[in-house]
Amino acid sequence: MPIKFYNTLTKQKDEFQPIRKGEVKLYTCGPTVYDTAHIGNFRTFLFEDLLKRYLILKGYQVTHVMNLTDVDDKTILRCNSDHISIHDLTEKYIKLFFDDLHRLKIIPADFYPKATEHVPEMIDMVKKLIDNGYAYKSEDNSIYFNIKKFEKYGKLANLNFAEQKTTQRIATDDYSKDHPQDFVLWKAWKKEDGKVYWESPWGKGRPGWHIECSAMSNKYLGENFDIHCGGVDNIFPHHENEIAQSECANNKPFVNYWLHSEHLLVDGRKMSKSAGNFYKISDLTDMGFTPEALRYLLLSGHYRTNINFSVDKKHEALKVIQRINDFYKRLLDLSSNCNKTDELPEAYNLFIKALDDDLNTPEALAVFFEWMRNTNAHIDNNILSDKDIIYAINFIDEVNVVFDLLISRGFRIPTKIVDLANQRQTARINKDWIKADSIRDQILKLGWIIEDAPHIGYKLKSVLEK
């Protein structure tokens, strides 16, 4: 059964067809690093982690890019209020972000480009837009994108221009879709920017927020790539503007599939510091939430529906995680004399069918939990065969590739990883270095590092081990 994703661009579930067979190029909008990312941000980051893990499980080679927005209006405002350099401010929050990624067992991206390190690419893209007739210079030497010149503007957010006026322009990064306006590509330097500026053909200034992602995705993934993700709040203006500037600069389609996760609610309300329901990952860890419990709570709801998070759900989540881990240990204890195989129980097909249907995690987990109850009952009644025990272990290993709900006790190495490592050893013995390198990359994509070692041949360790 093919994978189907709900594509925000087409407003329907589309069968997934990558540009290159067996390969997926994925771009996910990362954090703006002027403050600590909160649990609402990580709802999106965990959805993207699950998407990537599932594509890997299905056999795709995934190249993943997540940007780090380390210059924008909010970042400069925070630098000025805290009397700190932009580098010192953003490096502090980048470190905290990576700490939280590690804490939640999110597989690292292949690239984490910083906006400040890719300004030349942004300037080049702005030049293209001017040359192609889609951008113009204002009185203060800022450069704006003329949305009237791009007939398809609004196709992602489903805007109706017949009912809207588009005669003004806007320099701020955030604005309402009720009044789409020409947006800034390059901001001329102002006194409040202080030392934050770069030289350009139009004078001192800095890039607008939207051009950052277009330029960086273009550099690392090419002018047309497979999947772009983010939260629903990114659809407009950010992703709409990315499409406009990218397609007008390169004269070709930008992204084939757009996937967006819904908002996270906390205690039934929008999260805010004033409401007292604003949580960072470190806050929740201090309250006793484990990484596995947080992953379960944030992944058990469908990514396109609102999830209502509450600290009151901690006990329930911890019980679920303990039940899964106790079941897994029970199977391992029974498996010592069983012959190994890579086969799986019939329930696995239903699990995959659910995830093929736009990552239907509630249905996939329901299949898994029902199978777990039945299998536990078979163990209790002593009617589970040796073959079924190994099938069951393999199923949990596959589920864990996607959800990662097993508590990391020494990072037990899944059978699939060991098999790949052994295949790589065979390729090395045969001096098939291309195949050996390809398998090594596949192992890394699955979250494991293989190191060649004398006498024992190789060592494996999780990327999550420090």
Image (cartoon, rainbow, N blue to C red):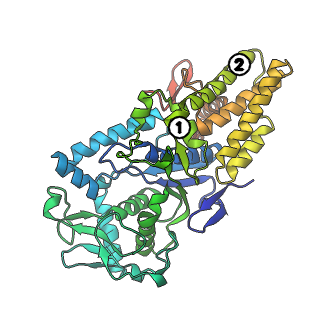
Q: How many numbered marks have been drawn onto this rendered protein structure?
A: 2
First of labels 2, 1 by sequence position: 2
Across and down, in percent, residue 346 comes to 81, 38
- Is residue 443 in view? no
Q: Secondary structure at mark 1?
A: helix
Across and down, in percent, residue 101 comes to 44, 38
**Quarter holding the C terminus?**
top left
Q: Which mark is residue 444?
A: 1
Quadrant hosting residue 139: bottom left
The type of residue carrying mark 1 is: Leu
Tag 2 residue: 330
Marks 2 and 1, how far apart at CA: 29 Å
Quadrant hosting residue 89: top left
Give above or below for 381 relative to 303. Answer: above
**Mark 2 surroundings: few (<14), some (14-19) or many (≥20) residues within 10 A:** some
- Is residue 466 in view? yes
Q: Which mark is residue 22?
A: none
Do tag 2 and tag 1 residues touch (Cβ < 8 Å)? no
- Is 340 on the left-hand or right-hand side of 237? right
Q: Secondary structure at mark 2?
A: helix
**Mark 1 surroundings: few (<14), some (14-19) or many (≥20) residues within 10 A:** some
Name the one closer to the observer, 176 or 466: 176
